[in-house]
Image (cartoon, helix red, strand yellow):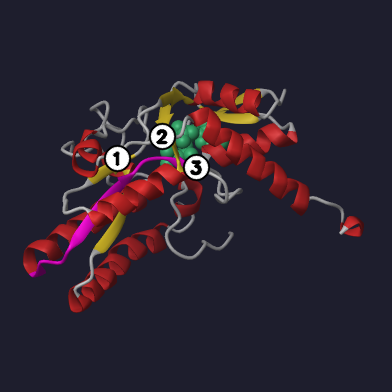
Amino acid sequence: GPDLPPGLPASPPNYQLNPVKTLKTNLVGTINMLGLAKRTRARLLLASTSEVYGDPEKHPQSEDYWGNVNPIGPRSCYDEGKRAAEALCYAYKRRSNVDIRVARIFNTYGPRMQMNDGRVVSNFILQALRGQPLTVYGEGDQTRSFQFVTDLVSGLIALMASNYSQPVNLGNPDEHTIGEFARTVLSLANSSAPVHRLQPAKDDPHRRKPDISVAKRELAWQPTVLLRDGLLQTIHYFRHRLSVDEKPQNEL
Ligand code: UDP
C-alpha cells in the first residue's frame, strides 16, 4: 500500500493503513516530546482531536465529556492513541510539572490541505471539479462541523499564549449533515456531478459539533470564517492545483 506521510495522518483511510505506526507515533512520539519539554522547560502543545469523544452520546461535545470510543474498532489506533497522548501530558504535568497545552481539534479544512488524503472535504471538492459522483458514505445524515484553517491557527496561538492547561475544543460549531455538505460543495463549485450513496463507514461518529464555551471564556477566541467563504477559497485552490498538475506535458 501507499506510504504514510511523515508525522501522524488524521485521515481515517490513511491512519488505518498502518494502525501500529499510528499508535507508536502517538505513544512514543508524545513521550519523546514530553521528555524534551521537561529537560528544556519548554511549553508543549498537544494537537489532540475531537476523536477522543468517539461516537458521542453527548451533543454538542464539551471538554468534560469522557467520550464513547470503541477500544478495538478500526478507529481505535487513532482515538486511543490520542487519548493516551492526553493521559501522558497530564501524567508528565502531575509528576514533573511539564507545561502543557492541549487542543482538541475538530474537522479543519482550507487551501494547501492534502488533496488526496481521502477525507470528505477534499474528496467532495475533487469529485465536484472532475464531474465525478460525490461519494456519500451511508445515508448522509451524519454530521460534521467544519473549521477554516486560519481560525484554527489563531486558536492555537491564543491557547499557547494563555495560562490554561486543561483541554480546549477548537472548532466551528456550524454543523451540517454530510448530504447537505455535498450539495453545498456542488453549488459553490458550479458542478452538476451526481451524488452516490456508498456503504456506511464502520464506527463513523454520527454527530459531531464542538461546544466552544471554554475557548470563548479562557482564550476570548471564536471562529470567524463562514463555511461558504472558506469553501470558496479552498475550491479556488483545488482548481488551481488541478490545472497545474493535469496540464498536458507538451504545454509546460
Ligand atoms: N465521508 C463521506 N464521503 C467521503 C469521505 C467521508 O461521506 O468520501 C463522511 C464520513 O463517513 C464521515 C464524514 O464524511 O461521516 C467525515 O469524514 P472524514 O473522513 O473527512 O473525517 P472524520 O471526521 O470522520 O475523521
Q: Please, is residue 168 above or below residue 252 in the view?
A: above
Q: Which residue is mark 3?
A: 109
Q: Quick check: is the Cβ at mark 3 less than 8 Å away from ligand 1?
A: no
> Dot 1: what SS?
loop
Instruction: Tell me the kind of residue under disc 1.
Output: Trp
Residue 76 visible to an observer of this rendering: no
The extreme left residue here reads 95
Q: Quadrant of the N terminus?
A: bottom right
- Kindly tell me whether residue 91 is visible in this rendering: yes
Residue 103 is a magenta residue: yes
Question: Which label sits on residue 184?
Answer: none
Q: What is the quadrant of residue 44 in the picture?
A: bottom left
Q: Nearer the viewer, residue 105 or 203?
A: 105
Q: Residue furthest bottom?
A: 39
Q: Tell how many labels.
A: 3
Q: Residue at x 34, y 60 (%)?
A: 23
Q: Is residue 129 above or below residue 186?
A: below
Give the residue number, with chain letter if any, for mark 1. Answer: 221
Instruction: State which region is magenta.
Output: 96-109
Coordinates of residue 182 in the picture (x, y in percent): 57, 26
Q: Residues within 10 Å of mark 2 (few under 14, many from 20)?
A: few
Taking the spot 21% from the left edge, 53% from the top edge, the residue there is: 162
Q: Secondary structure at mark 2?
A: loop
The question of residue 205 being in magenta is answered with no
Position of residue 106 relative to residue 56, above or below, is below
49 or 112, nearer to the observer: 112
Q: CA distance from mark 3 to mark 2?
A: 14 Å
Residue 231 located left or right of residue 34: right
**Left or right: 201 with respect to 23?**
right
User: What is the C-alpha distance between the residues marked 1 and 2?
Assistant: 9 Å
